[in-house]
Image (spheres, rainbow, N blue to C red):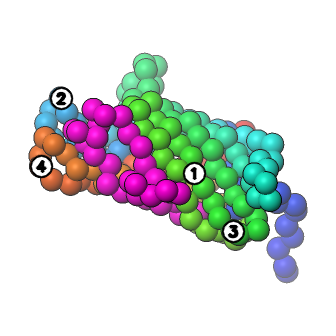
Amino acid sequence: MADIHGPQRLGPLTPLVGDWEGNVGIDLSYHNKDDETGRTGYFEKAWFHPIPVQENGKQSLEGLNYKMTAWRHGEEAMDPFHDEVGYLLWEKATGQIMRAVVFGRGIAILAGGEAKPRDTVLHFNATPGSPSFGILQNKYLLERAQLMDFKSTFTIVDADTLSYTSDLVLKLAATGGEMHHTDKNTLTRVK
């Protein structure tokens, strides 16, 4: 029996629409207060909502605005330790996808890749200095934890399950070396 698909105006972003939660998040990062790299488990809430079609001359972008907020396990009633807002965009004519994300730490990233309308694995990449898919950060972070690379993948596991990974390569002044700050979680649709 063939799959029956309804309209997917948002292309590969369509399955993301809604509200999500996940409690199996793992953050691997440098902990400045302890002067060491460590893992943090976290609970996360995310939402993805459609935006109006964006017209840039002949370019037409479909998209979602989104928010992802995370709390360390055991601190769900307290302030979150991570918060980000952004847009996921898709250009049907070229198959280009984009993730425009701003982190509350003073970091802005426009990452991109390619995807077909029904792809279930979406890759977003950015590098500092790129005129199209680049990374900006505040002066303090540039001196202490310079971002060298960003890779992120969203995987639509099924209609109600989404997983993601992200990898920020940092050049740390405290250690003199590079490290991979990684995050991953699996989220379930709640609305």
Query: Which is in the foreground here, disc 2 or disc 1?
Result: 1
Question: What residue is disc 3 on?
Answer: 95
Q: Amino acid at mark 4?
A: Gly
Compare marks 4 and 3 and give the one earlier in the sequence.
3
- The numbered mark at residue 99 is 1
| Residue 107, image quadrant | top left
- Residue that sits furthest to the top in the current view: 78
Q: Nearer the viewer, residue 114 or 83?
A: 114
- What residue is shown at x 72% (from left), y 40% (from top)? 49
Residue at 56% x, 65% y is 113
Segment colored magenta: 122-151
State the mark number for residue 126: none
For the residues bearing labels 1 and 4, Cβ distance under 8 angstroms: no
The amino acid pointed to by label 1 is: Arg
Disc 3 marks a residue whose amino acid type is Gly
Question: Where does residue 98 sit, x and y in percent of width and height?
Answer: 60, 55
| Residue drawn at (40%, 54%) of the image | 129
Q: Are marks 2 and 4 in contact (CB under 8 Å)?
A: no
Q: Secondary structure at mark 1?
A: strand
Does 141 lie within the magenta span? yes
Q: Quadrant of the N terminus?
A: bottom right
Counting the numbered discs, the total is 4
Marks 2 and 3 in Cβ contact (< 8 Å): no
Structural distance between the alpha carbons of marks 1 and 4: 30 Å
The numbered disc on residue 33 is: 2
**Could you tell me if the residues under marks 4 and 3 are in contact, i.e. CB atoms within 8 Å?**
no
Q: From mark 4 to mark 3, how far is it between C-alphas?
A: 39 Å
Query: Residue 2 at x, y = what percent?
Result: 84, 79
Real-space CA distance between mark 1 and mark 3, rounded to the nearest whole angstrom: 14 Å
Say which label, 2 or 4, has the lower sequence index: 2
Query: Quick one: SS at disc 2?
Result: loop
191, 36: nearer the viewer: 36
